[in-house]
Amino acid sequence: MGKPITRLLKDALTEKLVESLAGPIPEGTPRQLYGATRLPGKVTAVVGMRRTGKTTFLHQLRRERLSHGAKRDQLPYVNFEDERLADLEASQLGFLLEEYDRRVPEAGEKDTVTWCFDEIQAVPGWERFVRRLLDSGRVEIIVTGSSAALLSREIATALRGRAWEVSLYPFSFSEALIHRGHAVRDDPGLLTGVARARIERAFQDWLTIGGFPEAQGLDIATRRQLLLDYVDVAILRDVVERHEVSNVVGLRWLVRHLLGNAAGLFSVEKFYATLKSQGIAISKDTVHRLLAYLEDCFLVRMVWMESTSERQRMVNPRKAYPVDAGLIPVFDRSGRSNSGHALETAVLVELERRRCTVTYVRTPGGYEVDFLARSAAGEIELLQVCADASDPETEERELRALAEAGKRYPKARKRLLTLTHDGLPTDTPLGVIAQPAYEWMLLPQPH
């Protein structure tokens, strides 16, 4: 038995419940996700980095249920990221159900009640409560959280396979266009003249600004500070506090290194040696753990080298990317143009958005292909990303890499993605699809 619920907690929970049943459901830019967002008998777990729009997406799901015939009072919603709920325990969440039954006594007798719990990982032991609720009858449960551990460690263990993960990322290019009020064509490959110039400007703006919803439309200085704040909150709330990290200095060095070297190779051994040379005490095991925490909170995405040998995968460096290209100009200190790194980052995140598993390929001849993507349906694709492949020497190098990798993966589709239409190679060999990356991103995908 847990401790009794206080009057303060009761009042806060009641207020939130009443507001969710009576107030209008907030609207926002519709998100386009690949694959199912619900499976019968499973908890829908919406995960992703903070400020990517998980709350707005949760309300989008509520509006969808409403449009499909659900009653307004069958869509209760509670956001647990509230200082008044800081002392709330899972054993006290039963009050929420009791209060709902008092206010909507007939709910759940014939129709399904959709419970929406936002940032529920703030409540210790929440997973046991969710399991009990799921077992209680005619309910659908949607939860959100800022850490991948919400699913991988807690839901998977506590709910024993009764959870369905939905990962949410910052705005894709098509979502960013919709957010700005632009129409998205179904045939981006047929763009010409003014229309193509307009879409290419919008694409390059998006690569610079990034896809965080709140960053859209801000001036450079405000956007930079906003994104720095996002990273600080992710470090402190989702890594330091959540995992009780004591080596904060080493963690900040790691974050600056990873975000300042987008699309670069990362070696734990080399990073450990760098910190040691700076007099910063840290163990290699700690670096490995910190790296996993940063992936857990979606701040960083790591790509392993493709290999059937686990040892070979482990000894070769990984490639590191931020979760959003907009973070690159905030942390890069090289002073060089980042269009290539931003483009490669955007392609990786789009592949993850499409629920692909992604590695990179290094051929025996020393060539490298940026991504080998495997779709959920088992399709394989080699993707080479190059901002400008119109130069003959660059064209030869990029296409040679695809050809060499294609010998190892003969069933893989080969694709070369560029920043602009003018950056396409002059002569594309048979069996290679060459197109601007924005065309590939805007093409309708099967859901």
Image (cartoon, rainbow, N blue to C red):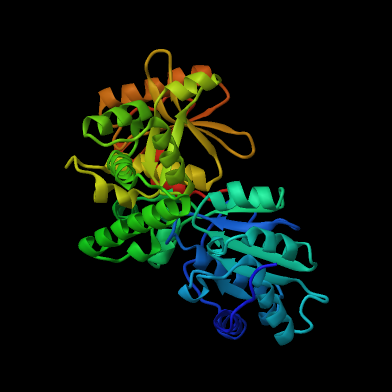
Single out the residue that lies furthest toward the left.
335
Q: Is 357 left or right of 399, judged from the image as shown?
A: right
Q: Determine if residue 435 is in view.
A: yes
At 58% from the left and 84% from the top, the residue drawn is: 7
Picture coordinates of residue 12 (x, y %)? 55, 81
Single out the residue that lies furthest toward the right.
110
Relative to 288, does residue 39 appear above or below in the rendering? Answer: below
Q: Quadrant of residue 422?
A: top left
Viewer-nearest residue: 56 or 177: 56
Viewer-nearest residue: 214 or 446: 214
Q: Determine if residue 422 is in view.
A: no
Relative to 294, does residue 76 appear above or below in the rendering? Answer: below
Single out the residue that lies furthest toward the top.
365
Q: Is 131 left or right of 263, judged from the image as shown?
A: right
Q: How many marks?
A: 0
At 39% from the left and 51% from the top, the residue drawn is: 191
Picture coordinates of residue 91 (x, y %)? 66, 68
* Quarter the N terminus occupies: bottom right
Q: Is 259 left or right of 151, judged from the image as shown?
A: left
Q: Quadrant of residue 135?
A: bottom right
Relative to 52, does residue 426 appear above or below in the rendering? Answer: above
At 66% from the left and 68% from the top, the residue drawn is: 2
Q: Is 73 left or right of 404, judged from the image as shown?
A: right
Picture coordinates of residue 392 (x, y %)? 27, 24
Picture coordinates of residue 69 (x, y %)? 72, 75
Viewer-nearest residue: 203 or 129: 129
At 46% from the left and 41% from the top, the residue drawn is: 292
